[in-house]
Amino acid sequence: MVLKPLPINPAIGLPVKSQSGKVACMSEVRYVGGVQLARLLGSLPKERPLYLALSRGVRTLIQDGRLPLGVRLPAERDLAAALGVSRTTVTSAYDNLRTEGFVASRQGAGSWTALPAQGGRRHGGLVFTAIRGDQAPGTIDLGCASNGAPDVFTEAVEAAVRRLPEYTCGPGYEPGGLLCLRAAIADRYTERGLPTRPEEIVITTGAQQACSLLVQALVTPGESVMVERPTYPHALGALRNRGAVVTTVGVSDGWDVELLADGMRQTGARLTYLIPDFQNPTGHLMSEDDRAAVVEMARDLCVQVITDETFAEISIDAEPVRPLAAFDGGGRVISVGSASKLFWGGLRIGWIRAAVPLARRLARAREPMDIASPVLDQLIVTELFCDLEAVRAQRAEHLGASRDAMARALRERLPDWKFTMPGGGMCLWARLPVPVASALCESAQRGGVRVLPGPMFGVDGVLEDYVRLPFALPPADLEEAVERLACAYEGTGVEAPHPTHPLPAWV
C-alpha cells in the first residue's frame, strides 16, 4: 500500500497535526537520505569552519528549490558518514540552520527543512501575475515571454481565409480539431522522431486549456502530483483548482532523475508534469539520456507523464532532441504543444498528443467548455506549419540577438547575477546574490520595468534569489530594461554578502 503524504506547514516545516494532536508516523513524510543529500551538496569545500560551509550548502539547496520544504533530513550520523566528516560537524550545521530558521526539529520526530518566519511574506503589497496588466507609459514589460507575429503571418491569414468557405457549409465546430491541422501536427511529430497519427492529436484552445483538460481527466482531488520547481505558474493553478497535492523536485541546475524517482516513490504520486524543452523559466534542455531515464522511471513506478513542449520548436543554437514521448512505447507520456510561442500569442491554439482512447475521451471532455477551437485560427496555424522552417529560422535569429544582448548587459551592469545561457526558449533564469527578488520586482515596476520574481514559479515561497528575464523584446529594449533593473537593485539597499568565511563550492 502506498501511503499518502501528509500536508506540511511550510512556516515550520513540520507535518500538520491530526485532530488527535498526534504527528504522523515517519513513513508518511517525505525524506532525503544521507547519501542523496551528500550528492546534492557536491564535493567538500576546503573552507573552515566546515560546519558553516555545510550549513550554507543545505540552506542554498532549500532556497533554490532543490530541497523541498517539509522534507525530513537524514540523521546526523548518516550524513556525517556520507560526507566523511565528524558527527559534531553535522550537529553544528543543523544547529546553525535551526537558528536561521531553515530547519525545524521536534524531539523524537527528527528535523525538517523549513523557511524562516518572515519567509511567509511574499511579493510585498503588489500582486505579480504572468499576464500583462495596466502599465505606466514607457514601462518595459518583461513579465510576458512572447513574440510578435512572424513575417509570413499575413500570407498565412490570407490563405486561411481563402480556405474558410470549405468549412462554412458545416456546423463550424469539431471537438477534436480540424483534420488538416491534426495531420500537420502529426507529421511534424513524425519528422522529429515520434511517429504519430492524426487520431492521436486533440486540438485545444491554447496549451493552458490542454493542461486543464488533462488535469481534470487524470487527477483526483487530494491526489499527489509531482512538478518541477521552478515551473509554469498556470500549470500550478490548474492543479490547485483541481485540489491536487502538489509536490516538487528542484530543477534550477537541471534534472536529477534519481531525485525525481525518489520523490514519486515517497509521495505516492502517479502523475508528473515536466517541461523538458527549454524549461520555463530556467531554459534547460533535457538530454536524451535523461529522457530515456524518465520514461524508464515512469514505467517502473506506473507513473503518467505530462510533457509540456510549448518551447520545443524555439531552438537558437541547441542541437535537436527527440520528444520525450519518442522514448515511450507504452502510452505513459502525454505531450502538450502550442502555436502561441512559435507563431503568435494571439493564436490561442494548442494540442495534446495522447493514445487514441485518451484522445477521444479528452475531445468529449472539452465540449462543455467551448465545444471546439475557432476554425479560422486552426486554418491559420495549418498554413503556418507549411512555413515552419522559415518561422523557426526567423525566431532563432531574432531571439539569439536579443538573448546575447541581454546577457552582455547583465554581465556589464549586474556582474554578480548568475545565469546559464539557454540554447533556446525565451528566458534567462537569473540568480541574485541575496534573496530579495520580490522586493526588487516591486522597485523595478516603480522604475519602469516589469519582471516576475522567483516565488511565482514555485509553490511554497522559496526561489526568492531568482528572477525570470524573458528576452523576446528587441536588443535595445532589453539593454534599457537591464539598466533600469540595475538601478532598482541598487535602490533596494542590499549588497552581495561578504561572509567572514568564503562561500564554499556548494554555494
Image: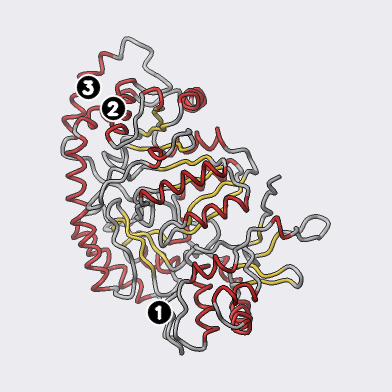
Decide: is 364 above or below 406.
above
Quadrant for residue 187, please give it.
top left
Residue 476 image position (x, y, % from top left): 18, 60
> In what element is the residue under mark 1?
loop
Residue 294 image position (x, y, % from top left): 46, 47
The residue indicated by pointer 3 is 161
Asked if the residue at tag 1 contacts the one at tag 2, i.e. Cβ–Cβ closer than 8 Å, the answer is no
Instruction: Tell me how far mark 3 sits from mark 1, CA to CA.
Output: 56 Å
Q: Earlier in the sequence, mark 3 or mark 1?
A: 3
Crowd around label 3: few <14 · some 14–19 · many ≥20 (10 Å) = some
Decide: is 248 above or below 378.
below
The residue indicated by pointer 2 is 184
The mark total stands at 3
User: For this rendering, which residue is in front, 270 or 204?
Assistant: 270
Which residue sits at x=30%, y=51%?
425
Q: Earlier in the sequence, mark 2 or mark 1?
A: 2
- Seen from this angle, which residue lies furthest top? 169
Residue type highlighted by circle 3: Val
Instruction: Tell me how far mark 3 sits from mark 2, CA to CA.
Output: 18 Å
Q: Which mark is residue 493?
A: 1
Quarter of the image that includes the C terminus: bottom left
Q: Earlier in the sequence, mark 3 or mark 2?
A: 3
Crowd around label 2: few <14 · some 14–19 · many ≥20 (10 Å) = some
> In what element is the residue under mark 3?
helix
- Seen from this angle, which residue lies furthest right? 20
Which residue sits at x=63%, y=72%?
78
Which residue sits at x=52%, y=41%?
299
User: For this rendering, which residue is in front, 14 or 319?
Assistant: 319
Decide: is 53 above or below 142.
below
Quadrant for residue 112, please give it.
bottom right
Quarter of the image that includes the N terminus: top right
> In what element is the residue under mark 2?
helix
